[in-house]
Structure formats: C-alpha cells, structure tokens
Image (cartoon, rainbow, N blue to C red):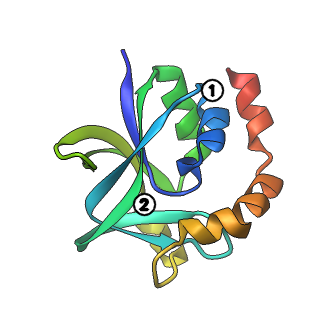
Amino acid sequence: MSDNCFTYGSLMCADIMSRVSGMALAGEPASLAGHARQPVADEDYPGVTADPAASVEGILYRGLDGSALARLDAFEGEMYERVRVQVNLVGGGSVAAWCYIFRAPYRHRLLLGDWSFEAFLAGGKARFLARYMGFAALEQDK
C-alpha cells in the first residue's frame, strides 16, 4: 500500500526527500490551509502549526511505502508528529496526505515570521546538508 506526504521545508528538495525516504519520488506543488510555517531557532528548517488564517505552500509526494514513512518518522524526530491532513492541489481538488506538524511542547523554539524556501536554497540547504549526519544512519536501516 502506498501513501502521500506533504512537505514544507527541507524535504521540498527532491534530492533530500529521496535520500531520507529511500525512494526516488517526484513531487508536485500543493498547499496546506489552516497552518503557518515558521523558522525553528538555530536551524535551517521550519515547523508548521495550526493557524486558521494562514496557508503553507509545499510539495506533495505520492506513492510512499511503509518503509519510507518509517524513515521519515526517524528523520523528523520527537519535535514533529505525523498527522493526516487534506492538501489542496494546484489544479483544484484536494488529497489526503501525511504531514509532520510541530509538537506543542517544542513551540517555544519557533521564531516569528515565515520560513523562506528561497533563503533555504540560497544558503540554508548547504548548511543543512553539512550538519545533518543522519543520512548514512538512515541508509543502514533500509
């Protein structure tokens, strides 16, 4: 059985998503209404929390298997909870997908303002890849 996952941060990059999930996946633009994306203090990645007045642009990946979801759970860690959400597709309609929502006990780590994917691509991605050593560990679990 396969599933969908909506991403809104570092995993919007197909190369990072493929390395983390262990699958070559093609993504498509989508959005998550009723949520806001904020930077996490001292990190290059964001967190998403419920906010009825906001919407988050991201990438939807389809066709993930159970192994890929387990790898994503390990990657996201304790600050995030995998939650079933409805995401809006660019051409209209919506689809159910998993999304990693920032857990309430860690919300003090979120900064004000919106996290920028463009800024991540310009410099944050290189820092993220240099600092994140878990890809090798995730590869061993495959």
Q: Quadrant of the N terminus?
A: top left
Name the residue type under label 1.
Gly
Quick one: which residue is furthest to the bottom in this view? Answer: 112
Label 2 element class: loop
**Above-or-below relation of 32 to 133:** below
Residue 55 placement: quadrant: bottom left
**Residue pointed to by mark 2:** 103
Q: Is residue 141 left or right of residue 84?
A: right
**Above-or-below relation of 40 to 9:** below
Q: Residue at x 36, y 27 (%)?
A: 3
**Above-or-below relation of 82 to 46:** above
Label 1 element class: loop
Dot in front, 2 or 1: 1
Camera-nearest residue between 70 and 124: 124
Q: Residue at x 36, y 40 (%)?
A: 98
- Which mark, by number, is residue 22? 1
